Image (cartoon, rainbow, N blue to C red):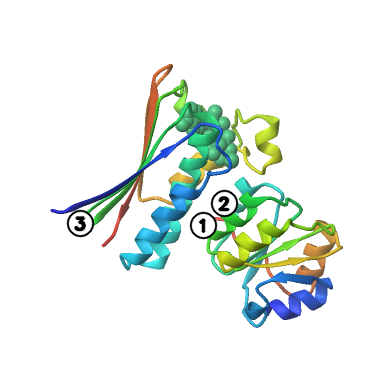
Amino acid sequence: MTIYTEEFRVERGNFQEAGSASSKIKRTLKKMGISPAIIREVAISSYELELNLVIHSLGGTLKLSIDGSQLLIISEDMGPGIGDIELVMQEGYSTASESVRAMGFGAGMGLPNIKRHSHEFSIESELNKSTRIVAKYNLI
Amino acid sequence: MILSEIADILDAKVLCGDAMLNECVESAFGADMMSDVLAFVKPHTLVLTGLVNHHVVRTCSMLDVRCVIFVRGKQPTADIVEEAADSDIMLMTTDHTLYESCGMLYGAGLPPVERGI
Ligand SMILES: Nc1ncnc2c1ncn2[C@@H]1O[C@H](COP(=O)(O)OP(=O)(O)OP(=O)(O)O)[C@@H](O)[C@H]1O
Ligand SMILES: [Mg+2]
């Protein structure tokens, strides 16, 4: 099975570039002829994950991986890790700063939103180490 | 509802994308948090906001939103308008507040977005 991957570095605090990886991923999926409805769902997940990397992580990568009928968006970072996964999955829970809120983010809606807009969703995290979040889509 | 009708109701000024004036939206959502826009907006939704920055355009572009209306007379900078034009997003601005604008459109029959997929 051919595997297509694209990987983007996402820097902590770089709001200037925030969204550019997701925008490139969206363009790739359009070129591949993937259905617009799925592209929109993937775009939401990748954008939420990319913003979380910028806002909450020490930096990391956003990856698109397509393997036949399965499409994955994977966010991996270099910390700080998530202590209580159940807590961060609650709508409204956010540790975003006032300056992030002033930019229009930090309502604590992102992670539950990804869960709603993906076919499968998982978070693995080790506190003070790293977090890996995967949103999975079935293409057929 | 057709975007030109919306522009008339809100006495809104078109900043870019006037070619889209005869396009249709099925619902509208008003918020100053892009996090909420991401969580609520459906395809063919009009976005009304008092927040003006590049993230508004980027967020709406991700969601395939076709038109954004800035309320309270907010004016985006030229580079924001340019980014919207590049992303095929129509921008308008109205002097009405978010509350007034939403009320006027709701009263004219434009429905809210329904929560859920
Ligand atoms: N990559 C990450 N590393 C460490 N903590 C994270 C990471 N992503 C999310 N979090 C934590 O989970 C919380 C909830 O994330 P979520 O995306 O749901 O909301 P938010 O980013 O705070 O706000 P919104 O997504 O609505 O703009 C964050 O406030 C943060 O504390
Ligand atoms: Mg988030």
According to the picture, the residue beneath numbered tag 1 turns out to be: B62
**Which of the 4 quarters of the picture holds residue A102?**
top right
Helix, strand or loop under label 1: helix
Is A50 on the left-hand or right-hand side of A93?
Answer: left
Disc 2 chain ID = B
**Which of the 4 quarters of the picture holds residue B22?**
bottom right
Determine the residue positioned at 86% across, 62% down: B96
Disc 3 chain ID = A
Q: Which mark is residue A68?
A: 3
> Callout 1: 10 Å neighbours few (<14), some, many (20+)?
many
Q: Amino acid at mark 1?
A: Met
Labels 1 and 3 share a subunit = no
Which of B81 and A119 lies nearest the eye of the viewer?
B81
According to the picture, the residue beneath numbered tag 2 turns out to be: B38
Instruction: Please identify the residue farthest to the bottom as the structure is shown.
Output: B22
Labels 2 and 1 share a subunit = yes
Instruction: Please identify the residue farthest to the top as the structure is shown.
Output: A128
Which marked residue is nearer to the observer: mark 2 or mark 1?
1
Which of A45 and B90 lies nearest the eye of the viewer?
B90
Helix, strand or loop under label 2: helix
How many marks can you see? 3
Q: Amino acid at mark 2?
A: Leu
Determine the residue positioned at 64% across, 51% down: B54
Q: CA distance from mark 3 to mark 2?
A: 28 Å
Q: CA distance from mark 2 to mark 1?
A: 9 Å
Q: Is residue A102 above or below residue A59?
A: below
Determine the residue positioned at 60% across, 31% down: A94
